Amino acid sequence: MASGVERGSGPPLLRMTGIRKSFPGVLAVDGVDLEVAPGEIHALLGENGAGKSTLLKILAGAQLPDEGSIELDGRPIEILSPHDAQEQGIVTIYQEFNLVPTLTVAENVFIGREPTRGGWIDWGRMRRETRAIMDRVGLALSPDRLVSDLSVAEQQMVEIAKALAIQSRLIIMDEPTSALAEGEVARLFAICRDLQAAGIAVIFVSHRLDEVKQLCDRLTVLRDGQLVGSAAVADVSIEDIIRMMVGRDVERLFKQRNVHRAGEPALRVEGLHASGDPRDTFATQLRGINLEVRHGEIVGLAGLVGAGRTELARAVFGADRIDAGRVLVEGVPVQPGSPRRAIAAGIGLVPEDRKQQALFLALAVRLNLSIAALDRLCGRLGFIDRGAETAMVEEYRERLNIRMPSADVAVGNLSGGNQQKVVLARWLALQPKVLIVDEPTRGIDVAAKAEVHQLLYELADSGIAVLAISSELPEIMTISDRILTMREGRLTGELPIADATEEKLMQLMTMGRERAA
Amino acid sequence: MSTETPAAAPANFDLFSFLAKFAPLIFLLVLMGVFALLEPRFLSPLNLFNVMRQVSIYGLLAIGMTFVILTRGIDLSVGSLLAFAGLVAAAVAKGGFESRFAVGTAAEAAGYGWFLAMLAALAVGVVCGGLQGLAITKLKVPPFVVTLGGMSAFRGAALLFAGGGPVSGFDDAYRWWGQGYIGPIPVPVVIFAIAAIIAAIALRYTRFGRNVYAVGGNPEAARLSGLDVDRITLSVYVIIGFMAGLGGFVLSARLNSAEAVAGLTYELTVIAGVVIGGTSLFGGIGTIFGTVIGTLLIGVLLNGLVLNNVSSYVQQIIIGVIIVLAVAFDTFAKSRRKRA
């Protein structure tokens, strides 16, 4: 791949050539080249399963390539371990956090590199430097807070702070923005530009192509483990990038939903209060939530990170305790505090974090898909009707276009998009009246995202009431019939889709309280 | 075997996962070959049935332990509970607590018979197992701690109950459960086989079995999928309690005696068998088939060592090393699953 690097005339900072890596049964990366210039922000793109993660793990020293060479500043290097990578100035911010939840922010930022004085840890210096770095990422967190008490977005910022604290030449960011809301994303972009100015290169992986357009200089696209090409970001349109990633034309990939007439109320929430986890003083408290979702309607729930969207979803589903208020399905109150009862009443929840909260990663797709619907598949004595189960799995495999080698493969071996489809299928199999989806397309590729949207439309058309949470405003504006906004545990506004603009939503999400007061 | 478990089988052939699956079986066959060469007596039907009969008691406990470990739990109290339940069964067979030391045919005739004795042993097992399950689910005490407490408490109860001596001398019908044969096969072996088949079917074909895998695979996901995680967790401790009760009864019948020191260090042997059989201590992965092979492997190893005059101290060292190696293998397999 003769992709000359325009920026500067010297050798590229990083040159990977002919990288090949296979796992049992899969050729994950097949002869890929990658060049990154000093001070360049380089986007690495591709659908899930395209080989991005493997390539990044090789750079981070977490995996060794089977073939290929890596050069830094024109001299060949070998990266045998994460420690080697750090020595070479290559720092990775993983999509899944590598923080120790039982340690403080400062201890995490300096883990393995604690400043010492006479053999003892210099706590004063550690706190001071942590505070300085946290200021730089724009998060006024006490260095002594425990990481387990932080929100997902805050943890992501700590992860970024940790990378900044290391002397680095190349920082790899694997979907750093998927856990962040708009304000924090802007902050992160500013940090990236600072790094760029200091001559540090960034490899940026994101599924949000508008961010790539906004931030990056060059991009490299992978598909099915192979190199599709590299280009200057300025020379290509988002449609071009999608075509490179998907390998086919996807002009109308994200269709707006046809305006739809909503039916009778399916879900009602009345006066919901919840104080959150008592051990976590920073937990968002839900205060006086009233809302209604009708049959056949998709209601979007928008808010910044920490606004209480996930807390609301979990409270309605009975996953967390509530202090006051009630939840009704078709006018019948649901006993609070038990997902089991919520499910029996007809509520389903696709949680925010599918790996931690939804999937049994080491277990078969079959089990993952049918686990909530087993009552329906069981005869007397609790024997599972395997034929009916296989038919169910087959039905949803076809309907949701789940790509899997067989129903007995571990769900953890599927790509993110297919994993998410399995979670959705689990709830569809129960035929719920209300489906709450929390970040339904987080970390999944463009094509799968469009499929998930289409599926949500079909569900709503079939009469299910859908409450959808997303941190991506464009997504909320694409899929919703009506949008509710939250801030600091309160609902702050409601907009029919016809009146919704990003500006109006941002206003309600950031200033709603004053307005409501 | 490839469909033995709801856990995954990779799409393509993979030497590592093949080995991971069949390693215990291969190791068992190799071990038997080696012992046969070293000591021809090893392969005699008498000895093989002897091994099987010894293994049966471990096997019953190991079946229960498989359920427990599949839910990420552990039960250290099985040996103590087995002794306690055996003593209670023996006392019932003797006509009650007061007359438990009576001997002779008159005393045998005065008892309540094997059936009530067995029921009593099972009841003790189920109640004690259930209490531990409640402590784990309601008081949220980790299984390791609860059953470590149980290990001490049930042993104490057994010692108190025995009052210093063994309870011995049962009628023929009682002893048949430990010493009898059905055709050429010793009764304990038949009991073990039936229990293994029922457990394998329950784990593989029923909703309960699925729920056990799910709770061990990801407890939070299980809760959010509407499973009653506490009830499922409680029931696995009831199951292992039941198995300890049954084991205590069969052991007392085989030895024609129940004593408070029965079942000492059984928990180690049993956990070793389960883990060697491929059940992951991290939960969610494992099969009854694996547990049967793993338990046979331990039984054959111990028997072969005895036949070759290896001292019992050395045997203990070998068992200890094997447990650590088996868990090391499990950890290695887990990291491979993660990376794949």
Image: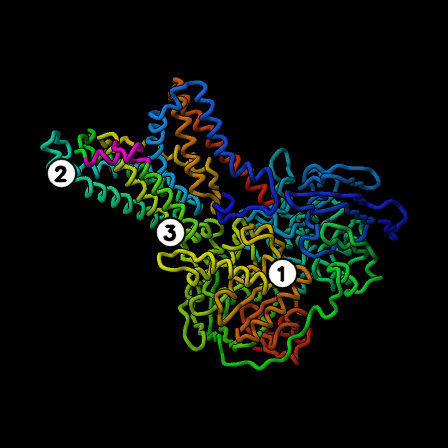
| Residue A412 horizontal side relative to residue A374, left or right | right
Label 2 or label 3, whichever lies nearer to me, is 2
Element under label 3? helix
Q: Mark on residue B137? A: 3
Label 2 or label 1, whichever lies nearer to me, is 2
Callout 3 touching callout 1 (CB < 8 Å): no
| Amino acid at circle 1 | Arg
Residue extent of the magenta highlight = B173-189
Q: CA distance from mark 2 to mark 1?
A: 69 Å
N-terminal label among 2 and 3? 2
Element under label 2? loop
Task: Based on the picture, tell me whether residue A173 belongs to the magenta stretch.
Answer: no
Foreground pick, A281 / A127: A281
Q: In the image, residue B3 lies at what x, y percent?
A: 50, 47
| Amino acid at circle 3 | Thr
Q: In the image, residue A494 lies at what x, y percent?
A: 59, 78
Say which residue appears at 46% left-offset and 52% top-offset. Answer: B214
Say which residue appears at 40% left-offset and 53% top-offset. Answer: B208
Element under label 1? loop
**Looking at the picture, does residue A494 appear above or below residue A104?**
below
